[in-house]
Image: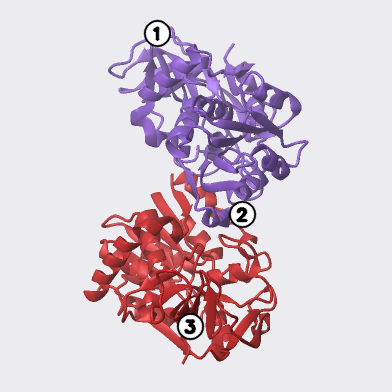
Chain colours: A purple, B red
Amino acid sequence: MAERKNRQWLLSARPHGLIKTSDFKWNETVVPPLKDGEVLIRNLAFSFDPTQRGWMSFDTYIPAIPLGRPMMAAAVGEIVESKKPGFAPGDLVQGLFGWEDYTTTDGAGLFAMQKLAPGTDPLLALSLFGITGLTAYFGTLAVGQPRAGETFVVSGAAGATGSVAGMIAKIKGCRVVGIAGGPEKCAWLTGEAGFDAAIDYKHENVGEALGRACPKGIDVYFDNVGGEILDHALAHLANRARVVLCGAISQYNEENGVFGAGPKNYFNLVFRAARMEGFLVFQFAQSYPEAIADLSKWYAEGKIKNKIDLAHGLEHCPETLIRLFTGANWGKQLLTMS
Amino acid sequence: MAERKNRQWLLSARPHGLIKTSDFKWNETVVPPLKDGEVLIRNLAFSFDPTQRGWMSFDTYIPAIPLGRPMMAAAVGEIVESKKPGFAPGDLVQGLFGWEDYTTTDGAGLFAMQKLAPGTDPLLALSLFGITGLTAYFGTLAVGQPRAGETFVVSGAAGATGSVAGMIAKIKGCRVVGIAGGPEKCAWLTGEAGFDAAIDYKHENVGEALGRACPKGIDVYFDNVGGEILDHALAHLANRARVVLCGAISQYNEENGVFGAGPKNYFNLVFRAARMEGFLVFQFAQSYPEAIADLSKWYAEGKIKNKIDLAHGLEHCPETLIRLFTGANWGKQLLTMS
């Protein structure tokens, strides 16, 4: 068989501050021969997630991506060659693949490769029914445990996870308040997304606005941003509140990353007999099928909107990732190869 | 009836930094006539608790003590006069009373006055069977939920609550590590108190020592101190760990008190899918009887030691309270009137 050309983005530097396009290096190579147990995947679409900055930087729940190796992403592709039992050319698969035309993998690991039903929309698979939607689902329901009538606040509310978290809390009967950047995102939250209130952190005093929007305090706070906004939320907790720690995007590019500054108001957890809990979506892997069933139903009923921010072309991967950290994206950031 | 003389300590200033004896003012007055619904109590013994600094400073779970009013404390006394149904002269009672010879009260509020069985030892009632022991009991069992074989770490381990928390975790089959100040306290922890290991924060690098003492990470961390030690513990969490927030005595005297510095390593709660939870012992009030039954049994069996640090004489109340914040006390700090 003729050699296949493979264009790819290698990780060339650990990021300091905001991720730069120079943290990646364009490379053109050829696909190596397949070994037993491996598949060759033609990538179709990539997901862009804040957690990727962690993978670029240090060992987290997965080992850091080695320098000089392809940058990794949650992705959907089509198998073009297989030496792995159970997988055949033409199969649509989802997993952790590289920013490249073709990925060779055994499909093992925390993001184990999974087959998708024929005809599945890769964009839906990578957003609402992927890590993003599952993170919103389990963070909201299993960790936050909102009850009807409670006040649910979410930061990064116009983002992929935050918007779905708020819509799920709304389905569960909560008063839902979103914190997002800019009047357009806020108008979308209280309009199409059905939130009860929105706070524009770029133009409002978040502490005062939370006081007005949450007169009985915050029962569940779903945090995607960390930093000062987390402190404002902690100052407004209701008794027995739950703080769901999902992300800290305001901190990822700071000098010491997520370990730079702690939440000064953490001791309100004592005064309010409240809890703050982190989670990794993988701990709920056994319940993914129920979650996807619920999300499918709500999506079909129009109760959950799946807003996608779509880029095109492998060559634009680095700048597309950077959009997450400048707040440029609106909804789930994805990229298709063509 | 002849007027009764009443010596008392009034709160004269909100504390700044370490509490000073000049934050209190000695006063000699007479007991006012009793109104309907009130009792007159001759105080016998006072409890000294870090949370009292909060009561002196600002509204917490109870309103701040007004300036010019007697300083309040958990206390045991004997009723000498009663206009309250159900309470009679000679009854031994526990509640929130003043630093004074005689307290006049209707006994209502969060620390509602409760009758003690005749012959109860006031020192036991104010320590193991009082707020201190109950805080250790519910913080450890209801919030921390330790399982046999897990690693349980407690700070302020030679203190009244910390030592009991560690001994309860030991009863539940945990490996128990205490953090305390000085070699004598540490020797007591691994000796009489039965802990598996002790770390002397005054002479050891706490982070390194935790790494050695907890090779599989910390499953439950019971925090009485906050500050840097909380950060070291967060850095050593095991997956699905529970951090029990009980106090932050290292911070109470800092410029911004418990709201001065947040735990920089809080984001490990995400990487470890762990939780950090505050509590107030009052939320478990309905379960006090079972708790006291368990604690009584363990005390009788010698599985829990009740170490008391006893001062004498009303005139020494202010300096006795200060002992808590300099780390001078060892075990439960109490004071008897004579």
| Spot occupied by residue B283 in the image (x, y as percentages of width and height) | 44, 55
Say whether disc 2 or disc 1 marks the residue closer to the N-terminus: 1
| Spot occupied by residue A7 in the image (x, y as percentages of width and height) | 56, 19
Q: Which residue is mark 2?
A: A265
Identify which residue is drawn at 56% across, 46% down.
Answer: A238
**Can you name the residue that lies furthest to the right here?**
A203
Instruction: Left or right? Give the position of B243 relative to B147.
Output: right
Circles 2 and 1, Cβ within 8 Å, touching? The answer is no
Q: Which residue is mark 1?
A: A118
Where, by quadrant of the figure, is residue B152 drawn?
bottom left
Judge whether residue B295 can be spotted in this image. yes
Q: Which residue is mark 3?
A: B43
Identify which residue is drawn at 56% across, 64% down.
Answer: B227
Task: Please tell me whether mark 3 sits on a helix, a strand or a loop.
Answer: strand
Q: How many neighbours does mark 3 have within 10 angstroms: few (below 14), some (14-19), or many (20 or more)?
A: many
Q: At label 3, which amino acid type do we have?
A: Asn
